[in-house]
Image (cartoon, helix red, strand yellow):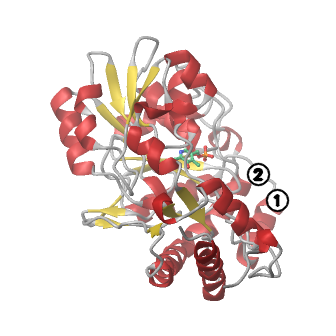
Amino acid sequence: MRKPAILGGKPVRKTFLPFAKPFIGEEEKKAVMEVLESGWISLGPKNREFEEKLANYLKVRHVIVVNSCTAGLFLSLKLLEVKPGDEVIIPTYTFCASANVVEHLGAKPVFVDVEPNTMLIDTEKIEEAITDKTKAIMPVHFAGQPADLDKILRIAKEYQIDVVEDAAHAIGAEFDGKKIGNFGLTTSFSFYAIKNMTTGDGGAIATNNDEVAERLRILRLHGMDKDAWKRYSAKGSWFYDVLDAGYKMNLTDIQAALGIVQLSRLETFIKRRRKLAKYYIELLGELDFIELPIEKPKRKHVFHLFTIFLKEDKLRINRDKFIEALRAENIGTSVHFIPVHTFTYYRIKYGYKPGDFPVAWEYYNREISLPLFNGMKECEVEDVAKAMEKIGEWYKR
Ligand SMILES: *Cc1c(COP(=O)(O)O)cnc(C)c1O
């Protein structure tokens, strides 16, 4: 048996393999330089072009680009006039932003537990969380796999509440053969640095509702009825009206130009991620101390994350120690997610205990997100698998 690097053995890799990193090619650099030299760097023609291309790709009527997915989720709830006293249903297994935006509006995030393994909102538990104050359900397409939108839309219709999707992980993912973006009232995507495609920071809201799209455009930029491009370009006029106390949540043309190139690569990125995930499953399939991620029927999973769960009864070390051991082998990892109800702010404000959502809590304690990124090579997946096997062998119970 080979000695783990954490105990002084030779590490599997000489150089550090990060958990994630963006793929930026020459075309992206060229596109950004062109905008910088064009004299128009904030919201303008590249925003329009990016929105049109995203709408075409997603096959939706409207896309409104914003400065983050968080902004997209916030504006979606603002649009629904979510206010103090209202409630929004959210899986606790998500990034804190999903819940924070509800707090920003003075409303209450009502957490729901998730299904084992897929970590998607448990649709059996949604109805018991609905009250007469519930305004919306916010499903999270965890790791790039869509939640059960059939069931969620059916419940939402029955109780007359809206569905606002957190698709930060899931651009290009499909449910029942249709791209995410065509189901709920709005769907927000993230273009944060290490998401499946990036603009550095950025996001987009998709909707098939004309009125919603119009409202979102106004809310995104100060409540103005005209953006700067409509005022300062050759055909523009200086006058504008303010229809609402809106926000400053637009994307710049520098970011949009980067996004246009990234979008042109997205299908290649997704193919690559799916292939790497399949290779992981093949290599790790034999290891009896690992629970591998499951792809559910009717879904196209875009593998933003490759999440595994340790079987603690098979190992003498816990997840935290396993991560340290991987780090010593020069393998970077992460954990997704720390359940939101366990964070100090939410725990104190609402009196939650970790075990209140037992599936989220149990799986969180066993989860490791392995390296997976657009430019990752097969040999790097092999290194991760070797390190996993080596550590698992040594610490076998
Ligand atoms: C990344 C992420 C967000 C936030 O996206 P930003 O673009 O950084 O605002 C929201 N929800 C989930 C599940 C995420 O992973």
**What amino acid type is highlighted by mark number 1?**
Leu
Residue nearest the viewer, comparing 163 with 336 = 336
Q: Residue at x 53, y 49 (%)?
A: 365
* Some atom of ligand 1 lies within 8 Å of the CB belonging to the residue at label 2: no
Q: Is residue 114 left or right of residue 10?
A: left
Q: Which residue position is annotated with label 1?
A: 36
In the structure shown, which secondary structural element does the residue marked by tag 2 occupy?
Answer: loop
In the structure shown, which secondary structural element does the residue marked by tag 1 occupy?
Answer: helix
Where residue 55 sits: x, y (%)?
Answer: 44, 58
Q: Which residue position is annotated with label 2?
A: 41
Q: In the displayed orientation, state which residue is furthest to the bottom.
A: 379
Mark 1: few, some, or many residues within 10 Å (few <14, many ≥20)?
some
Q: Is residue 218 above or below residue 196?
A: above
Q: Residue at x 71, y 56 (%)?
A: 200
Q: In the displayed orientation, state which residue is furthest to the top.
A: 85
Residue nearest the viewer, comparing 306 with 31 = 306
Q: Upstream in the sequence, badge 2 or badge 1?
A: 1
Q: Is residue 132 left or right of residue 250?
A: left
- Mark 2 vs mark 1, CA separation in Å: 6 Å
Residue nearest the viewer, comparing 378 with 72 = 378
Q: Is residue 49 left or right of residue 36?
A: left
Mark 2 touching mark 1, by CB under 8 A? Answer: yes
